[in-house]
């Protein structure tokens, strides 16, 4: 067989992914004086982070001086139903404010308070108004700031390059191998340390706010290289996406709408969230409209509106209303800010949403309520990491951002992702650089392994009459949507695993037409491998966890179970076979436990 | 459901041609949906870029019926049923394949812009800025880097020879955004003339017309910049001076 040609680049640290987490990691690694390469599938500045709307959670205390890291920590743990990695939640709450101020020093222009400080807005599950924001385009501000700061730090950026597999030297990760999307030619990055910052897995579902990039590459690269994944059963279905009209169906409606005064109503006009307050949140949630209304202006003496309960609770409530026949005409519920806030205020707070809906659907959000329902949005699970260093369970491998697991437990609070990217992106860059510096000598890449990956990558071209990659992807999306959605049962999860097995067999016969230059059919065919891997992990972990918690609801086990509340489901792979086990959560120190008891 | 003929450019630097696809559309579809439908059925290797399908990432730029637009923000019901709609790559940048072009010119220009240098914070370590001061720069921060303004600007589009010395409208507003940052201390006035070539712009306003973010590229960005270069210190015209002054700024 002919040897496949490829170019080689060498760096101390390779960061895979140029969203918030990857950019922050690359900047930090470069600051440590090591040589850094940053690889991304799309053009620079187009990663998912650009789409984030509502804001970055950080206890700056600019709007509510009572806010501090302890309260943020408590909110995060509570939102995750206590199965978060406590140390990650602690570091996140402690360091987020400094990371946001650092963005400001690098040029980000956040919306201001009257005193000229960074303004903060209300979001679900956050005790105080906590989200630093720029209207509803916070992610754009964040990624541009990092991007323009980053290009002056001596980082080598490799755009539109997809990593297919990691390489190893013995136990250690020694590089990453992939192809240029533009040319289809191969490229090897030799590195002492690799940071995975590849984002999520949403493309496994049919209805999702995620883009084509979210095929679970980072999680799969880690698993294939021998690293553990955790919490893969915890998938976030964001409660409010447009369900009508079709031109905007599926688009996310930021939680900021509810933070800024919007409320959810069923077809009878009833504010139904008052009927869905779980015991865990009774103490801090208003149980009547009058108190909820007073809360917007007087947070000290009133409890928060149930419209701002954590996302998993709101998503399930919407689903229950629709199921009971109280939904909107197109299978959602109503989200009303139009009748509650002045048009000018809405346009100022939600400018890009106003503009987008007007342009695409003639929907004027200042005049009429929106019809919304849940869609897949985020994965809490991911690569298992050490909290302080972000090191995965394979030496030389690090992970941060949505690709990593643990920080958010079973349910992420809105705004806690952007802050997570900055806090753990920085830590990943720092520790990857330190690791690379401490590692003397050079690592080897097994040339035979590289040739094998390259040949596998080219296989679809040998099957001109093979399966259509888009059809396999669509069938997987249907499977996950119908059988591994918001509400799960043992029977359906087993059914899903069977179907995934059959899809894996079809994917081995996937074909490709056309050539190697910028060929999306070929790219889609290759992405199936990781997409099927993470879909299987999710279904396996969901079958294992026989309880309901956060982003994992079992109809056949509808309650949370204290025993399950003490363990993570951990996945690993040997010789292509995925297996799972339960492991106890890291033990939380007493002083942090005490914080969780306080009703602040 | 209405059916359209999509006349899509297929080809690479070696050559290419428009190819017709008959596509049935569903309610509310945008051009990008139709391109995806063609990919999923007839032409799996049809190359195009996209990410957000929400007008936020600026990946899906193309020339639709000759007009530079975002495919994801162009509704199919803009066109008459049965109409033939042409979709071509943005013309100003070298073709890679089908609807994908090499936009690296823009990333090169981005690197050349002299970065921000902030003045020291207040004595308590905090930065304070008023919303009305931030608003002006925020307009330019809305840019999604779709490069449609770069595509339409004749200085780049029709004059290969200008490319080395002309930054283009995207980067004029980048510079304007930095200049209007309430805390910036760098004076880029001279640099804008010598390195960004703003003098080559003859204010045709084509860039402003195509900007999907409706940024007032010419009126709020380029024109004040040109006036400032001409050292017009009329405070009414040159708002920046009035509000903050260029005093104390260091040349780039
Ligand atoms: C519509 C929307 C709104 C949101 N709003 C908010 C919000 O208001 N607040 C909040 O906190 N969170 C929000 N989120 C969530 C948050 O935006 C994401 O979780 C976060 O941006 C993920 O960042 P990341 O750095 O981990 O990954 P991303 O930003 O997705 O970046 C992933 C990078 O990895 C690259 N990549 C992936 N695979 C490969 C590969 N195989 N080879 C090479 N490169 C690869 C991609 O090209 C990309 O550069 C929102 C999400 C969505 C979808
Ligand atoms: S106004 Fe200037 S920058 Fe804009 S398109 Fe015309 S010449 Fe180009
Ligand atoms: S200024 Fe407007 S047209 Fe130009 S790149 Fe930015 S968003 Fe696109
Ligand atoms: S796909 Fe993001 S702007 Fe069109």
Image (cartoon, helix red, strand yellow):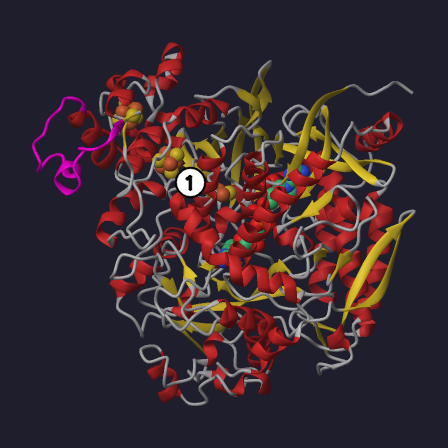
Can residue B185 be seen in this snapshot?
A: yes
Residue A145 placement (x, y as % from top left): 43, 41
Tell me where residue A75 sits by quadrant.
bottom right
Magenta-span inclusion, residue B242: yes
Whole-percent x, y for residue B251 in the image: 27, 25
Q: Is residue A472 visible?
A: no
Residue B203: within the magenta?
no
Report the residue at 26% width, 28% height from top.
Answer: B250
Q: Nearer the viewer, residue B12 or A301?
A: A301
Residue B55, compared with residue B207, is above or below; it is below
How far across and down, in percent of the image, does residue A115 sit? 25, 60
Secondary structure beneath label 1? loop
Residue placed most toward the observer, B129 or B105:
B129
Q: Quadrant of residue A568?
A: bottom right
Q: Which residues are magenta?
A: B229-250
Identify whether B6 is placed above or below B230. below
Q: Is residue A570 left or right of residue A21?
A: right
**Helix, strand or loop: magenta stretch:** loop
- The residue identified by callout 1 is B144
Question: In this orientation, which residue lies closer to the viewer: B38 or A320?
Answer: A320
Drawn side of residue B237 relative to residue A381, left or right: left
């Amino acid at each position: 067989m002919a040897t496949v040609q490829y170019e080689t680049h060498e760096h101390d640290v390779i960061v895979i992914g140029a969203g918030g987490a990857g950019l922050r990691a690359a900047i930090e690694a470069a600051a440590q004086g090591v040589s850094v390469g940053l690889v991304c599938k799309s053009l620079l500045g187009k990663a998912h982070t650009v789409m984030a709307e509502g804001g970055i959670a950080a206890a700056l205390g600019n709007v509510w001086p009572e806010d501090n890291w302890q309260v943020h920590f408590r909110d995060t743990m509570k939102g995750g139903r206590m199965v978060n990695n406590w140390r990650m939640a602690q570091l996140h709450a402690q360091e987020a404010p400094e990371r946001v101020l650092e963005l400001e020093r690098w040029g980000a222009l956040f919306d201001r308070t009257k005193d000229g400080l960074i303004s903060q807005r209300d979001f679900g599950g956050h005790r105080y108004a906590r989200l630093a924001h720029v209207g509803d385009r916070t992610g754009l501000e964040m990624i541009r700031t990092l991007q323009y700061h980053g290009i002056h730090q001596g980082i080598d950026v490799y755009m539109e390059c997809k990593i297919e597999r990691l390489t190893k030297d013995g136990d250690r990760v020694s590089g990453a191998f992939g192809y240029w999307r533009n040319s289809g030619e191969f490229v090897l990055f030799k590195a002492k340390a690799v940071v995975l910052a590849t984002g999520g897995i949403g493309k496994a579902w049919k209805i999702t706010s995620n883009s084509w990039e979210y095929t679970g590459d980072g999680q799969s690269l880690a698993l294939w290289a021998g690293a553990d994944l955790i919490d893969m059963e915890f998938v976030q279905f964001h409660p409010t996406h447009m369900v009508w009209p079709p031109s905007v169906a599926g688009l996310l409606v930021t939680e900021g709408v509810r933070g800024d005064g919007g409320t959810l109503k069923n077809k009878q006009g009833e504010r139904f969230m008052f009927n869905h307050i779980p015991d865990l949140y009774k103490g801090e949630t208003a149980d009547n409209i009058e108190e909820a209304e007073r809360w917007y202006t007087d947070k000290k003496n009133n409890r928060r509106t149930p419209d701002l309960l954590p996302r998993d609770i709101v998503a399930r409530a919407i689903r229950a209303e629709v199921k009971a026949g109280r939904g909107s005409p197109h299978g959602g519920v109503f989200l009303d800010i139009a009748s509650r806030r002045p048009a000018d205020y809405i346009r100022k707070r939600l400018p890009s949403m106003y503009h987008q809906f007007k342009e695409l659907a003639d929907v004027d959000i200042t005049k009429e309520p929106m019809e919304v329902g849940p869609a897949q949005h985020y994965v809490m699970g991911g690569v298992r990491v050490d909290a302080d260093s972000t090191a995965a369970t394979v030496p030389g491998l690090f992970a941060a951002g949505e690709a990593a697991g643990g920080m958010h437990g079973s349910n992420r609070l809105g705004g806690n992702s952007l802050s997570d990217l900055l806090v753990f992106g920085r830590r990943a860059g720092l520790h990857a650089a330190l690791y690379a510096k401490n590692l003397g000598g050079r690592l080897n890449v097994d040339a035979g392994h590289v040739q094998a990956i390259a040949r596998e990558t080219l296989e679809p071209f040998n099957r001109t009459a093979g399966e259509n990659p888009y059809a396999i992807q669509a069938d997987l999306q249907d499977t996950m949507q119908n059988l591994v959605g918001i509400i799960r049962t043992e029977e359906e999860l087993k059914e899903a695993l069977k179907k995934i097995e059959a899809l894996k067999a079809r994917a081995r016969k996937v074909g490709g037409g056309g050539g190697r230059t910028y060929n999306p059919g070929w790219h889609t065919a290759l992405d199936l491998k990781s997409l099927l891997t993470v879909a299987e992990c999710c279904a396996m972990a969901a079958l294992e966890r026989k309880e309901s918690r956060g982003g994992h609801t079992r109809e056949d086990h509808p309650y949370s179970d204290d025993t399950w509340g003490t363990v993570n489901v951990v996945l690993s792979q040997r010789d292509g076979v995925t297996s799972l086990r339960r492991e106890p959560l890291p033990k939380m120190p007493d002083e942090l436990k005490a914080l969780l008891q306080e009703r602040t | 459901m209405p059916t359209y003929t999509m006349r899509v450019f297929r080809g690479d630097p070696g050559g290419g041609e428009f190819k017709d696809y008959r596509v049935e559309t569903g309610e509310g579809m945008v051009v990008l949906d139709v391109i995806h439908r063609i990919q999923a059925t007839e032409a799996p290797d049809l190359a195009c870029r996209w990410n957000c399908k929400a007008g936020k990432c600026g990946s899906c730029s193309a020339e639709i019926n000759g007009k530079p637009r975002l495919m994801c923000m162009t509704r199919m019901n803009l066109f008459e049923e049965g109409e033939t709609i042409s979709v071509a790559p943005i013309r100003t940048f070298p073709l890679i394949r089908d609807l994908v072009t090499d936009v690296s010119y823009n990333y090169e220009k981005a690197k050349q812009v002299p970065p921000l240098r902030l003045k020291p914070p207040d004595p308590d370590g905090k930065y304070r800025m008023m919303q009305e001061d931030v608003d002006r720069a925020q307009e330019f921060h809305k840019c999604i880097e779709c490069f449609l303004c770069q595509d339409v600007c004749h200085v780049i589009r029709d004059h290969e020879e200008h490319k080395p010395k002309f930054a283009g409208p995207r980067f004029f507003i980048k510079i304007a955004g930095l200049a209007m940052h309430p805390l910036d201390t760098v004076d880029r006035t001279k640099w804008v003339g010598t390195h960004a070539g703003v003098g080559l712009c003859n204010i045709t306003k084509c860039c402003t017309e195509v900007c999907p973010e409706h940024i007032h590229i010419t009126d709020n960005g380029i024109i004040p910049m040109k006036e400032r270069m001409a050292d017009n210190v009329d405070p009414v015209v040159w708002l920046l001076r009035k509000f903050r002054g260029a005093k104390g700024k260091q040349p780039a």
